[in-house]
Amino acid sequence: MELKAAADRLFPADAGVRRLAAELYAAVADAPIVSPHGHVDPRLLLDDDPFADPAALLVTPDHYVLRLLHAHGVPLDALGRGPAGSSAPRDVWRAFASHWHAFAATPVRVWLEDTLQNVVGLDRHPSAGNADEQFDAIAAWIADPASRPRRLYERFRIEVLATTDDPADDLAAHRALAADPSWHGRVIPTFRPDRYLDPSAPGWRQALDDLTAASGIETGTHAGLIAALEDRRAFFRACGATSTDTGVVEAWAVRAEPAELERIHAAARAGDVPASDAAAYRAHMLWELARMSSEDGLVMQLHPGVLRNHHAPTLQRFGPDTGHDLPLPTAYSVPLRELLRDFGTHPSFRMVLFTVDETAFSREIAPLAGFYPSVFAGAPWWFLDSPDGIRRYREAVTDSAGFGKTSGFIDDTRAFLSIPARHDVARRMDAGWLATLVATGRLPEAEAHAIAADLVGPLPRRVFRLDA
């Protein structure tokens, strides 16, 4: 089957609205990409080595791809994620190509079609019959110097790319890129403190030791942990960071007394912490992160509601990020009330709220963003970053929060080649929603053009303080 995406894909079905959507999209289609939340390894751009092979580039690291293939009966060790089984790159690609049908009508199909056609240059859908031919074609594309990461960064018109980094990271790749006279892009770190928030989590004590080594501050006490995190935040800011990123199961943020925190901290260091104590500690740590953001100005991104590593046997055999993180119902208004009482109107505090529970957009996130100057409605993320998810997001948040209290699009990806495809989908869907507002008499056409232009660049730069 021919691989040729329609020029007017994803626009509304009505012919008149479709024409206006096409005009709005055309005005922003080639605008630079602002990516303030992602997971690309900065060493990719520092080293600028050729990509390894087609499977390692497009299949093995992408949990969106892995989860659906696994759901259709393809073992993860046949997809390059384990030491055993048929995991040679060509065999991985064959498994992917022979299951192309599994991605029909999913956002993954939209991203892959765009990537394969417009980045790699293929002209046919993958299939069992053409798997070897396409593997060889992609391998030849990889060997072309024009396909190196730095050349693609320029080709994709990326203006800024944020990564996700542990507080104990020395940010050597970021610092080396910034000092490289041949590099003209902007790659900035993002402070991700998740490892330090839950004293009952496996690896918490090792995380504290890592933080002590990085900061030079002892973390044997809760006060020491807070001081070490503040020290590393300052280091991240000096290396260009403008935001933090925090993933928790629940959004509870409640301040606890110092003596109680020290008691829990000491018990956890000794290896014995009850579930109720761990929950109180986590809630306080989320409050502390907000307090730090109100003081140092780093934008606080919060995405609760994900049950990580749902299938224990898969985690034990293949590790995390293998497709079995699942969404949970999530609340914000009550859990964040104390945090927003203390910091919600603070002039330096800013919080971007994400969700994988789309009922929360209209019920909680948009109303919060519609009152608090500090709160912004994060873009559809993860399970919701599909064309229909983006449309439902706009329908859900516009009434309460408008456009100016949203975050701009978030690609949230490790798949470097998919970045332009993901931003293109968002631009098309936003153009369609704006065209619908114009067609129904809710927005003047000139203002729709101004909003479309704001959404792709100026808005995310303002929200994430990228020009500060």
Image (tube, rainbow, N blue to C red):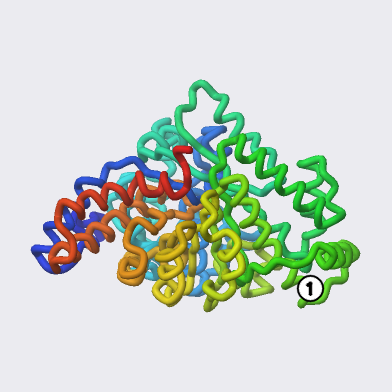
Residue 301: x and y in percent read 54, 57
In this rendered view, identify the residue nearer to me: 301 or 288. Answer: 288
Q: Residue 136: in sight, yes or no? A: no
Residue 59: x and y in percent read 49, 56
Name which residue lies at 37% across and 50% down.
Answer: 134
In the figure, is residue 36 to the left or right of 78? left
In the figure, is residue 384 to the left or right of 263? left
Q: Quadrant of the N terminus?
A: bottom left
Give the answer, above or below, for where 45 lies relative to 218: above
Give the answer, above or below, for where 245 lies relative to 185: below
In this rendered view, identify the residue nearer to me: 418 or 425. Answer: 425
Local crowd at mark 1 within 10 Å, few (<14), some, or many (≥20)?
Answer: many
Q: Which residue is mark 1?
A: 277
Residue 95: x and y in percent read 47, 63
In the figure, is residue 75 to the left or right of 28? right
Could you tell me the amino acid type at mark 1? Asp
Name which residue lies at 13% across and 65% down.
Answer: 439
